[in-house]
Image: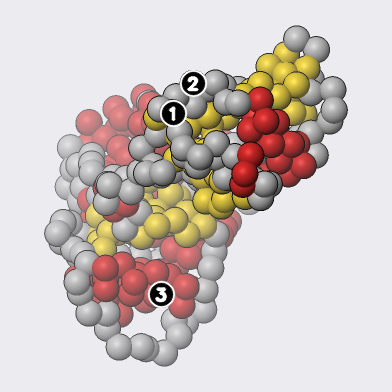
Amino acid sequence: MREIIGGIVLNAVRLLRPFAFFLMLAAAGCHAQSASEGGGKLPPELARRVEILIRSKTSLPPNYDVVIGPRAHSDVPGFDEIVVLFSAEGKTSKPMTFLLSTDGKTLAQFSKFDISKDPKELVSAEGRPARGGPANAPVVIVGYDDLECPFCAKMHAQIFPALTERYKDQVRIVYRDFPLDQHPWAVRAAVDANCLAAQSAPGYWNLVDYIHAHAADMGGAEKTLAKANETLDTLTKEEGKRQKVNEAALNACIEKQDDTAVKVSVKQATDLGVDSTPALFINGERLEGAVPMEYVYRMIDKALVAAGQTPPPPSSPAPQSAPAAGTPGQPVPPAGSHQ
């Protein structure tokens, strides 16, 4: 039990939070209320049994008062709602809702979650350059990426060749930005890549491939932020020329360094509970950290089955070494098609 509100009010009944479980009241059934009257204050004897059970399950200190509200209608058949407050020294906790059976013999608490939405729709791939399968691919992987993150680079080097070989057009992949504060040039890399993405999806992926493969060299021999930024801008402009984009627009975007979209992406990731990279969402299911490819395969196979698709047969483990990287100024070709 942890104290809250300036160390006065406990985060009471935290132990009662996990999903659903039922707390049986004392078995003296002859004293229990036989049925709900449709609302109203609890009889003192029933309120006392509820309070004693809550105190015993939470180790609530004796100086804390427990205030139990009246019954109210709930949407759970056979149960009413009661609201419980905890207070001490003039401070009061947030209200906590319990369920009390209509016969007064069972107290319950559970967490209710909305699963009406397809998890695939909770993490959007809209507006981002994609590689792999078409827009209607049965599995969409949204990766939150930091271009300066060595673990991201390791996963990036493995994931695309492996997934393209195994799943062909069944999987579509997009990246969203999540540059970490401890990586000094990660935001600039994201902004530059997005400037190129606005005009060329293939150019975006070529640039991302190259940056991930050469992140350790980005600061030059001096390992300075200024040199890293200069190199990133140069690589972006050179790739823009290869893709025959509007160079004036690209150069203006690079010069402006507007990180608004990057901040929005970071906020979205944070709201989803992301706090490290790499983080993948496979049809909405989260997978964080650099993990073995068989874990990724397992999640994709399950997503395919849920979508009514047949996963490919098992294959040999993905190679652990990174594919050969291009020479400076010549990004490696992307693995898989660009959409």
> Which quadrant of the structure image shows residue 168?
bottom left
Q: Are marks 2 and 1 in contact (CB under 8 Å)?
A: yes
Of badges 3 and 2, the one in the foreground is: 2
Label 3 element class: helix
Q: Position of residue 100 (x, y in %)?
A: 52, 38
Can the viewer see residue 119 in this picture? yes
Q: Which residue does the image show at 22% across and 79% down from the upper left?
A: 310
Distance, label 2 to label 1, CA atoms, is 7 Å
Label 1 element class: loop
Distance, label 3 to label 2, CA atoms, is 52 Å
Residue 299 falls left or right of residue 181: left
Q: Are marks 3 and 1 in contact (CB under 8 Å)?
A: no
Judging depth in this view, the residue of 151 and 28 nearest the camera is 28
Which quadrant is home to the N terminus? top right
Residue under label 3, please give it.
Answer: 298
Judging depth in this view, the residue of 17 and 301 nearest the camera is 17
Q: Position of residue 40 (x, y in %)?
A: 49, 21
